[in-house]
Amino acid sequence: MPGSAYAIRGISSIHQIALMRLEGDGMVGVPGIAMRLFGALARQSVSVILISQGSSEHSICFAVAPGDADRARAAVDGEFALERQAGIVDELVIEDGQSVIAAVGEEMRHRPGIAGRLFSVLGAHGVNVRAVAQGSSERNISLVVDQADEGRALNAIHDGFFRPRRRRVALALAGPGGVGGSLLEQIRDAAEALAAEDLEMRVVAVADSRRLLLDRGVRPPGVRPPGVRPPGGIDLGRWREELESAPTADRERLLAFLGERRGELRVFVDCTASPEVPGWYPEMLRHGIAVVAANKLGFAGPMSTFEDLRAAARHHRTPLLFEATVGAGLPVLRTLDGLRRTGHLIAGVDGVLSGTVNAVLDRLGPGEPFSRAVRWAYDRGLTEPDPYQDLSGGDVLRKLAILARLCGRTLEPAEIEVEPLLPPDPWSAMDLDSFWNALPQVDEAFERRRRQAAEAGARLRYVASLDARGARVVLDAVGPGHPAHGVTGADNLIAFTTQHYRDAPLVLRGPGAGREVTASGVFADVLEAAARLEARR
């Protein structure tokens, strides 16, 4: 009756049928074809289990019991012999080894979207539907699937419609270093809170540059019986020890492994700084695996690569999220996306995009030289393992490139003007010990610039700007009227100027550096990706 908790009240199956298809151009618009077909079958006492016909009238699909297949073929061949000779009706196509799944329920009439949800559930479990039949009463939807998929289809529909809507996320992580390791800790600590929201997050794969650890409880492809749930994921208290003895990292093995987990919401997370890993994204997206990235290289390289990645995400309707590439834990990209969706034209972007550099500059003063401030940031995990990567300006350049592209600019990295805090020569070639030994040589130059700024009532800030003139990153002395003047510690600040925020820009400010902060931004993207994957079902 209307108002029942379950739209579908029952699921049944016919274990074995033969699916037949009569088609041809000579059937289109010709009255009496269906009457002749089913009349011929009736004269041979062939019972038809299911009928499906498209509006094009080019084909009629029907199912019979396997024992009736030969008589059905003879009946159809005899009835349409002349049309076959004229070449306007094709030979009858017969597919053995099929099954019929029927979903029935009175309430199906009153709830829109049941068919869509049914197909989404089967698609998520890798079940291909060969034919569909639904009567005008809307109380029954019958589907033909391969007999080998029958058990999986029944279990999938049962889980999708009768079990609590508990979301299961299968997460694969590349790059379990500072940010990636913090992410795993946060997932472990949040397990109870997520479970209270009917979300179960399983880390099923962890890969570093050498090794790939997979959830050991998962059977190899093709071994797991239909309907058997995967186990609970990698032990997040022991993953470091287990990774040390894991096999060599292999992208194809990881992709095949994730491909087997179709019943779960699959998310691949890239916390590496590798230029190779972004090359994995298109294949992940093609297989319906959401991609969450803290790695900037796939989005701040050639413009064509950026466009191809976003096009792949749209084409496959699979989430591609990279919030942490710009704002760490700040919702910078979400805010920018919201502005553009509501019609704002972005006239300018200004801000401090490196919490690391800002923390260093903010500590400069009498008794705190530049070299000591950099070492302080390094010891607290605010810098990259190689601090020169922060001081070269390359990190800020990549963030500004991503922002510019999301503002609608087709900007290549070489078009961004960058003033590095330390020039490539000689700093880029130094090992870490040489770097620390040489760094005090620049203390006097930075102290001179700091003192000049202070005398003018300004502060040194590493400012990134995007406007009609172009994009630039410079070490600047900013006065009290500049949004970046009051930014302290490891905070980031981004100010968006639009036609509605012209006199007073829209400003975001908050922590922009640190492993835990960045990991929290990645974690937020993982949850968002899971929600989008669930909605797609």
Image: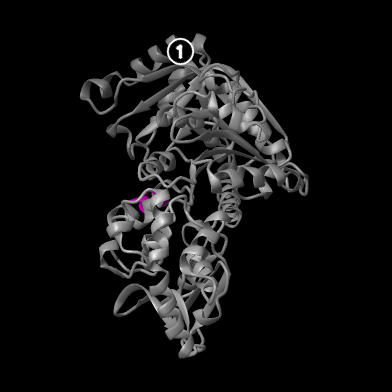
Q: Quadrant of residue 263?
A: top right
**Residue 521 coordinates in the image, percent (x, y):** 57, 56
For residue 105, side relative to residue 517 (left or right): right
Residue found at x 74% / y 40%:
164
Give neighbour class at mark 1: few <14, some 14-19, many 20+ (Cα, 10 Å): many
- The N terminus lies in quadrant: top right
**Residue 265 coordinates in the image, percent (x, y):** 57, 40
For the residue labelled by badge 1, is the local secondary structure a helix, a strand or a loop? helix
Is 261 located above or below residue 489 in the figure? above
* Disc 1 target residue: 69
Residue found at x 43% / y 60%:
390
Q: Quadrant of residue 473?
A: bottom left
Magenta stretch encompasses residue 250 = no
For residue 352, side relative to residue 196 (left or right): left
Q: Which one is in front, 528 or 60?
A: 528
Residue found at x 38% / y 12%:
74
Q: Quadrant of residue 153?
A: top right
Q: Which one is in front, 410 or 488?
A: 488
Q: Is residue 335 among the parts visible in the rendering?
A: no
**Residue 332 coordinates in the image, percent (x, y):** 51, 66
Is 9 located above or below residue 356 in the figure? above
Q: Which one is in front, 160 or 143?
A: 160
